[in-house]
Structures are given as C-alpha cells and as structure tokens.
Amino acid sequence: MNELEQIFIEMLNNIDDHKEAYNKPEWTNEAIVKTWIKAHETQLKKLFISGVTTNTMNEDNKKVWRGAKVKCDLCSYEWIAVYHRDCDKLECKNCTNMWHFEEVEII
Ligand SMILES: [Zn+2]
C-alpha cells in the first residue's frame, strides 16, 4: 500500500474511532483535513517531493528516447528503431547507409 493511501486510511479510521469527538460543530470536514495535513506535514512533503521527482524523470525519458517504426529515405526499408530525439539519421539495417529516415505508423 502506498504511503498516501495509508495517510488517508488512518484519517478515516481515526474519525470512525472517535466519532463523538469529531461530532463537535468546530470539526467540519475542512477542519479535519487541515488538522490531519498539519499533523502529517513532514510525511506529506516527502511524498510529494519523491512523487514529483519520479514523474519528472519519467517525462524526460519519454521525451529523450523514441521507439518507433522507421523507414529509410534511401531504400524504403522499414524497421523498428529506438533513437534519441535529436537524432536525424540512422544506420539503415538494409542498405547500411547513415541516412535520413521518417517515422511510419505501425499497422
Ligand atoms: Zn536503407
């Protein structure tokens, strides 16, 4: 179970266990959530920082490396290649030339 789920579950369990205490008019849902966040601030901060870091890294990897079916502009041979986004030439598996290519859709 992930840590964020754990925090939410603990909060709901805590409300269930202390229904009478939470029944007071000052315990609005908003107040409960705010108090819970305050109490778990450090834990939450760590979670969000690690979450953001992981997402950014995955985004970067997706943008930098492409996997696609490509077609050699010289001999029209098609193959599946993984290449860097800045790359505009690939070595053709058929004619072995280092040549321009285009992406083709995989049908
Ligand atoms: Zn070729």
Image: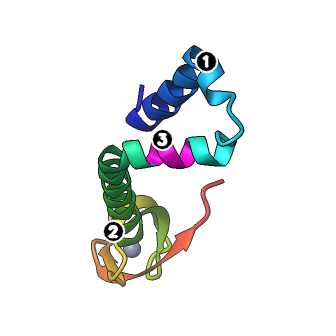
**Label 1, label 2: how far apart the Cα atoms are:** 54 Å
Q: Which residues are magenta?
A: 33-37
Of the image marks 1 and 2, the number of the one nearer the N terminus: 1
Query: Is 95 in the magenta?
Result: no
Q: Disc 1 residue type?
A: Asp
Q: Which residue is mark 3?
A: 36
Q: Secondary structure at mark 3?
A: helix
Amino acid type indicated by mark 2: Tyr
Q: Position of residue 72 (x, y in %)?
A: 44, 75
Per the image, the residue denoted by label 2 is 83
**Residue tagged 1:** 16
- Mark 1: C-beta under 8 Å from nearest atom of ligand 1: no
Task: Tell me the residue at 33%/68% (across/down).
Answer: 83
Decide: few, some or many residues near mark 3? Use Cα within 10 Å; few <14, some 14-19, many ≥20.
Answer: some
Sequence-wise first label, 3 or 2: 3
| Residue 30 relative to residue 56: left or right | right
Is residue 61 visible in this depiction of the protein?
yes
Q: Residue at x 37, y 77 (%)?
A: 85
